[in-house]
Image (cartoon, rainbow, N blue to C red):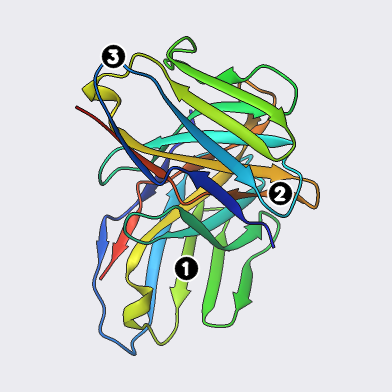
């Protein structure tokens, strides 16, 4: 149980375009979802936390207008990178916590974004 | 703020035990976690320990917690090639993040070779 999927697994986009990444909890209801960013050979940096039906709360230094997060249902959250630039290239990982899993975060497989 | 430290690399021979160490600064941590990340993949939760426990064993994995020294370790018995990965220690901070949710703070990761 506690499976989290992400789609796509990798994406290449041109500078200036927007790209949407989906995060789904497959077998539990995720009341809270988290979005992380990971640079090569570095740790995970929490970008934002979203509760279902509420606006996301962003960590300090993360631009909310650039990284749009929507958590419209108990099984789906999306991250949209708007007007992407090469410096946004990174590995984006989501995690979910929820009913029956209050003390744990289950992570998706990640999405590698490359902006050319 | 919270800080979690790990050594960057650990190399062991197949069949030996691996011990990955982690230190943290937040004395109000409630849960401490070990995650495994294989190349190009997300994080897999291996095990976790509640802060009022000293030890937890789960098959080949043994977690030791020294709360006084804020030191956490993960021992992998009979290390196999499939154990090669990056291991992240994380603490569930006692401090509330911006969301009012106790956020996870990750260490830098230890690459087990």
Q: Secondary structure at mark 3?
A: loop
Q: Are marks 3 and 1 on the same chain?
A: no
Residue where numbered disc 2 is placed: A103
Residue where numbered disc 1 is placed: B74
Q: Secondary structure at mark 1?
A: strand
Circle 3 crowding by C-alpha within 10 Å: few under 14, some 14–19, many from 20: some
Q: CA distance from mark 1 to mark 2?
A: 19 Å
Circle 2 crowding by C-alpha within 10 Å: few under 14, some 14–19, many from 20: some
Q: CA distance from mark 3 to mark 1?
A: 44 Å
Give the residue drawn at x 39%, y 72%.
B19
Q: Is residue B70 left or right of residue B82?
A: right
Give the chain letter at badge 1: B
Mark 3 vs mark 2, foreground winner is 3
Residue where numbered disc 3 is placed: A16
Q: CA distance from mark 3 to mark 2?
A: 39 Å
Q: Nearer the viewer, residue A62 or B25?
A: A62
Residue B110, x across and y down, in percent: 33, 58
């Amino acid at each position: 149980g506690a499976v989290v999927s992400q789609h796509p697994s990798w994406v290449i986009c041109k500078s200036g375009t927007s790209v949407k990444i989906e995060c789904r909890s497959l077998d539990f209801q995720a009341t809270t979802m988290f979005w992380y960013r990971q640079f090569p050979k570095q740790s995970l940096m929490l970008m934002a936390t979203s509760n279902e039906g509420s606006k996301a709360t962003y960590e300090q230094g993360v631009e909310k207008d650039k990284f749009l997060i929507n958590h419209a249902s108990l099984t789906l959250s999306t991250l949209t990178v708007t007007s992407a630039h090469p410096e946004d290239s990174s590995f984006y990982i989501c995690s979910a916590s929820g009913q029956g899993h209050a003390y744990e975060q289950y992570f998706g497989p990640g999405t590698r974004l490359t902006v050319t | 703020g919270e800080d979690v430290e790990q050594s960057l690399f650990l190399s062991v021979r197949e069949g030996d035990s691996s011990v990955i160490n982690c230190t943290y600064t937040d004395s109000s941590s409630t849960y401490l976690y070990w995650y495994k990340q294989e190349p190009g993949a997300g994080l897999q939760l291996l095990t976790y320990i509640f802060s009022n426990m000293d030890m937890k064993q789960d098959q080949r994995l043994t977690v030791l917690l020294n709360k006084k020294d804020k030191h956490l370790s993960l021992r992998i018995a009979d290390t196999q090639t499939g154990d090669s990965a990056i291991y992240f220690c994380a603490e569930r901070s006692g401090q509330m993040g911006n969301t009012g949710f106790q956020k996870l703070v990750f260490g830098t990761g230890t690459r087990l070779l």
